[in-house]
Image (cartoon, coloured by chain):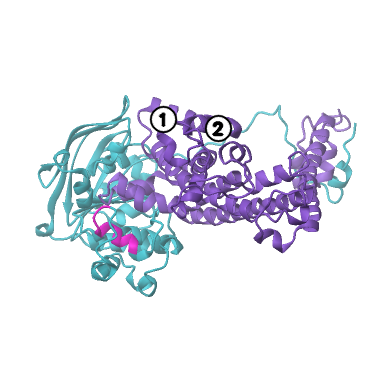
Chain colours: A cyan, B purple
Amino acid sequence: MSVPGDQTIHSGPPPPVRRIVVSEEPTIVEPPRLDPTAPAAAVTGAPLTRRSDSLPASAIVERMRTENLRLYYGDNEAVKGVSLPVCRGEVLALIGPSGCGKTTLLRSLNRLTELTATARREGQIFLDNEDVDRIEVTQLRRRVSMVFQQPNPFPMSVFDNVAYALREGANRKPRKSALMEPVRQALDRAGLLAEVESNLDHPALRLSGGQQQRLCIARSLAAQPEVLLLDEPCSALDPKSTETIEQLIVKLRSEVAVVIVTHNLQQARRIADKVGFMYLGDLVEFGDGEQLFSNPREARTADYVAGSFG
Amino acid sequence: MGWLGGEDPDAQVRCPAVSASLTGGRTSAVESSRTWPLIDRIMLAFCWIAGISACVIAFAIVAFMAYKGLEFLRPNLFVERPNATFDQSKSGGFLDPLIGTILLTTMGTLVAIPVSVAVAIWLTEYGRPFGLARAVESAVEIIAGTPSIVLAIFGLIIFQQEVFGFLSFRAEGGSVFGRSFFTAALMMSLIALPLIVGATREGLQAIPSHVREASYALGKSKWATIQRVLLPSVRPAIGTGTVLGMGRIAGDTAIVVVLLGASLQIQGYGDIPGLDILRGNGGTLTSYTYVNSPAGEGAAPDKAYAAAFVLLMISIGLNLFVSRLARSGKSATAAATR
């Protein structure tokens, strides 16, 4: 039986090649092998510039610390005994493949993991030498604030988004006039004030993605937190917004301790003073950003930053 | 089976899509449907016919009711009170039933909204213990599935109890009558409740969890988050559910007949102005249509047609309003999850 329409389909010049033949053995293409002796920097390619130099040692103060931190989801151990310092004056970047516990670790720092019913924590987390379990949770989260992967402004005006963080609970007071100054300050710190100054009353959801994310940062900064947690804050953004936010993060580190989870190794290299490489729940390597990228101590770190896996 | 070889021995299986794309041609929809099995083509034809007949039926309802209704609809029908008389020229309009519909719908909705939103919030944001959440879900489903005549009879039994005497009035013998705008509106709220609960739940579930966490991460309590972040986000959803519920209340007859008395005129009871109406009996456009239809005792079909047309317009208007609300809600959610 010939198929109607077949002739018209094949009229004109004959098809160039191909025909899918099922019986034929597929050709297997060998992937190019990475030279294990080559230095990591050679593989990562383009030279990277840091956004700024490290701050002097006197400016670096330890604010948070985890001690043998273990986190479980049910029986699954997501973070396996991690001890880390978090310091003001430094940007700490957590890198590693997906699902290796970076975000879980980050969320545990302000006890957001407690919202997951199956999550369980062992080990201790200290904020200024005080166990976070002893700090009332809403107080803790005012001091240790977080910015998320997706920009998530609330369905209210630009002004109210920031003012919400400043007001107690669900209150609508203090009034707008009383909060104008701190709100503008927060927007300014997040580098957004110039763009939204004239329309603070517009709905925040009308802003562009990059502006929304900076608004979220402004919102987090408004309550004067001591630690700022950023969970892949640029992964949903374009390069231009990413650059703005990276500059912002570097600028903020002198006032706030910054922890950033990122999948973007170049980003970590550009902004981080300290880098922690996590793999399957372990903190494989922790050290100076430059050293970890150019001269890693662990083979797994070398493979990861060279792009061999992950 | 020309596909598998035949004149072309090399080709064992040739995918039509591939060959079409390679030649740069494109198969038309008609062409590809010709290769379908007969049963598929019959099913497709059935889908087309079903869709088109739905349009035809909807159009027929509106067209027929408009034709019949507009023929008898006079402006004075909206302002004249109905009278029980054999002389149709003196039997008045449907002012009272129109007010009854508006009053009952408003009251039912006002009761339903806070309860439904509270149920939806509890189910999505708390929902522990799990067994209780399942029970609440089933309860809402049961309420949704209960025929309104059953709700009406149930309401009558409940509201005739002594304790609920303040909601209606006492009949001559001293027993509680149980039929009033209050009691009917309470039962009507149960008709709207599942719709508002469902819409609000869907709205809440559509909010990504990181939005809630962003609020917690600012040191906000769960309750503050619900008030200032979640409720404003689901306002369009609540609106959609509410308007759907209003349509259902406005269109219900059984509860009006059993619990409102389905009287032609609104009959107040007591001497407190306003409250007397709410404790008294009345009717709505649905009961007016029923009573005046050839099935009822009024036997004034022209007025029934006019009232039915007005009722239909109210329902269609509410439904159009719902789709507009849903559209605006969707664009708001799209912006939120961008």
Q: Are marks 1 and 2 on the same chain?
A: yes
Name the quadrant of the N terminus of chain A: top right
- Whether residue B157 appears in magenta in the rendering, the answer is no
Compared across the picture, whether A259 is left or right of B286 comes to: left
Furthest-bottom residue in view? A198
Mark 2, other Cα within 10 Å: few <14 / some 14–19 / many ≥20: many
Which of the pair A276/B336 is nearer the observer?
B336
Chain-order first, disc 1 or disc 2: 1
Total number of numbered discs in the rendering: 2
Q: Which residue is mark 1?
A: B133
User: Residue, x 78% and y 40% (percent of image)?
Assistant: B50
Estimate the x, y position of residue A128 in percent, counting from the top left.
Answer: 11, 47
Name the quadrant of the C terminus of chain A: top left
Compared across the picture, whether B260 is left or right of A196 comes to: right
Between circles 1 and 2, the one closer to the viewer is 2
Q: Is residue B279 above or below residue A194?
A: above
**Element carrying mark 1:** helix
Mark 1, other Cα within 10 Å: few <14 / some 14–19 / many ≥20: some
Prevailing secondary structure of the magenta residues: helix
Chain letter for the residue marked with disc 1 in the picture: B
Callouts 1 and 2 close, C-beta under 8 Å: no
Which of the pair A257/A170 is nearer the observer?
A170
Estimate the x, y position of residue A27 in percent, counting from the top left.
Answer: 62, 33
Amino acid at pointer 1: Ala
Amino acid at pointer 2: Leu
Estimate the x, y position of residue B245 in percent, counting from the top left.
Answer: 56, 45
Q: Which residue is mark 2?
A: B151
Residue B36 can be seen in this image: no
Q: Which residues are magenta?
A: A160-169
Estimate the x, y position of residue A32 in percent, counting from the top left.
Answer: 48, 40
**Element carrying mark 2:** helix
